[in-house]
Image (tube, helix red, strand yellow):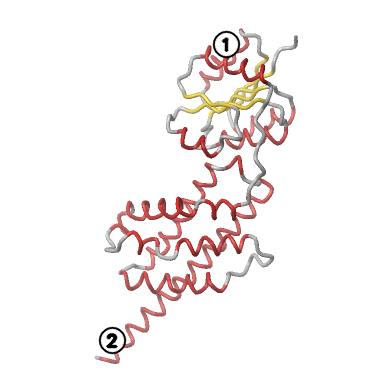
């Protein structure tokens, strides 16, 4: 029987050396990669029966990229994620149908070998669910985005000083996300929807009355972008890679345009208020 071919991906040199040697002792033919580019080169030039990838290779969530590439290129390969964070159980729920199993570091090599053998005997690699567009991800996770954004706003030193409640911090966030989702699916991606334009202007006016400075409007947008990108990273395996870059570019463009409208409304109303004060004086 031919040796089973394993690709082991990890950015820690000692682990690559140790795991590769031990797996070879158990009869596996092992290739190693230290980065995503190295892993992608291996995937596109060789065939594998098993992929074992660290979750965080250089950057958090890089393992998703490697598994996604293997899924698309070699769908019969058995895929494992290795993580040093027990809280990965949370992320696992989002990718349950995308990986075959996972292990938490430090893990005994015997456990890994037994799990690999078990999966190879079953020989039923998980099939990925139909890939989703970014617009669907936004719609399905609006509450999570909303809660994470508010939490990060309250953690920001400048925004924390503004005396508003959570509902006011969230402002029109759900409506904005819904309008961005519509824009992502539109035939006219460069054009904000009329409601998005109205909401953006209203956001600037509301934040002025709450005691914001213009720099805080920028912080609002930066926080929202960060929350969305973290969500994308967690759900990377389930997203439509062929549209993801374009969708993210359109998302950023939409948020930038909405920020400009918010700043303009903020400035216009601030100037109008000063003019009224001068006239009254």
* Residue 117 horizontal side relative to residue 169, left or right: right
* Residue at which label 2 appears: 277
In this view, 172 is above or below 46: below
In this view, 106 is above or below 165: above
Quadrant containing the N terminus in the rendered view = top right
* Residue at which label 1 appears: 22
Q: Earlier in the sequence, mark 2 or mark 1?
A: 1
Q: Position of residue 124 (x, y in %)?
A: 68, 25
> Measuring 49% from the left and 46% from the top, which residue is drawn there?
230
Graded by Cα atoms within 10 Å as few (under 14), some (14 to 19) or many (20 or more), the crowding at tag 2 reads few
Q: Are marks 2 and 1 in contact (CB under 8 Å)?
A: no
Q: Position of residue 190 (x, y in %)?
A: 63, 67
Number of the label disc, if any, that sits on residue 212 = none
> Measuring 60% from the left and 35% from the top, which residue is drawn there?
97
Q: Position of residue 66 (x, y in %)?
A: 62, 33
276 vs 133, nearest the viewer: 133
Graded by Cα atoms within 10 Å as few (under 14), some (14 to 19) or many (20 or more), the crowding at tag 1 reads some
The CA span between labels 2 and 1 is 78 Å
* Quadrant of the rendered image containing residue 166: bottom left
180 vs 245, nearest the viewer: 180
> Measuring 33% from the left and 87% from the top, which residue is drawn there?
275
Q: Position of residue 162 (x, y in %)?
A: 29, 63
């Amino acid at each position: 029987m031919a040796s089973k071919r394993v690709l082991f991906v990890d950015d820690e040199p000692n682990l690559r050396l140790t795991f590769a040697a031990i797996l070879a002792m158990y009869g596996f033919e092992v290739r190693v990669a230290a980065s995503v580019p190295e892993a992608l080169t291996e995937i596109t030039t060789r065939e594998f029966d098993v992929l074992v990838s660290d979750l965080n290779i250089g950057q958090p969530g890089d393992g998703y990229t490697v598994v996604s590439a293997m899924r698309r290129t070699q769908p019969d390969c058995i895929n494992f994620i290795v993580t040093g964070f027990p809280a990965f159980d949370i992320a696992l729920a989002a990718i349950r149908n995308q990986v075959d199993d996972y292990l938490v570091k430090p893990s005994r090599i015997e456990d890994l070998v037994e799990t690999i053998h078990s999966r190879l005997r079953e020989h039923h690699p998980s099939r990925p669910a139909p890939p989703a567009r970014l617009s669907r991800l936004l719609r399905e996770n609006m509450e999570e985005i909303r809660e994470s954004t508010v939490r990060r706003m309250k953690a920001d030193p400048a925004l924390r000083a503004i005396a508003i409640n959570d509902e006011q911090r969230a402002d029109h966030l759900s409506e904005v996300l819904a309008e961005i989702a519509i824009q992502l699916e539109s035939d006219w991606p460069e054009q904000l929807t009329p409601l998005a334009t109205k909401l953006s202007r209203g956001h600037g006016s509301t934040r002025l009355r709450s005691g914001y400075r213009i720099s805080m409007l920028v912080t609002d947008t930066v926080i929202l972008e960060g929350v969305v990108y973290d969500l994308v990273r967690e759900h990377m395996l389930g997203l439509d890679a062929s549209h993801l870059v374009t969708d993210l570019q359109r998302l950023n463009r939409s948020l930038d345009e909405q920020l400009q409208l918010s700043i303009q409304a903020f400035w216009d109303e601030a100037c109008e208020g000063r003019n009224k004060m001068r006239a009254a004086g």
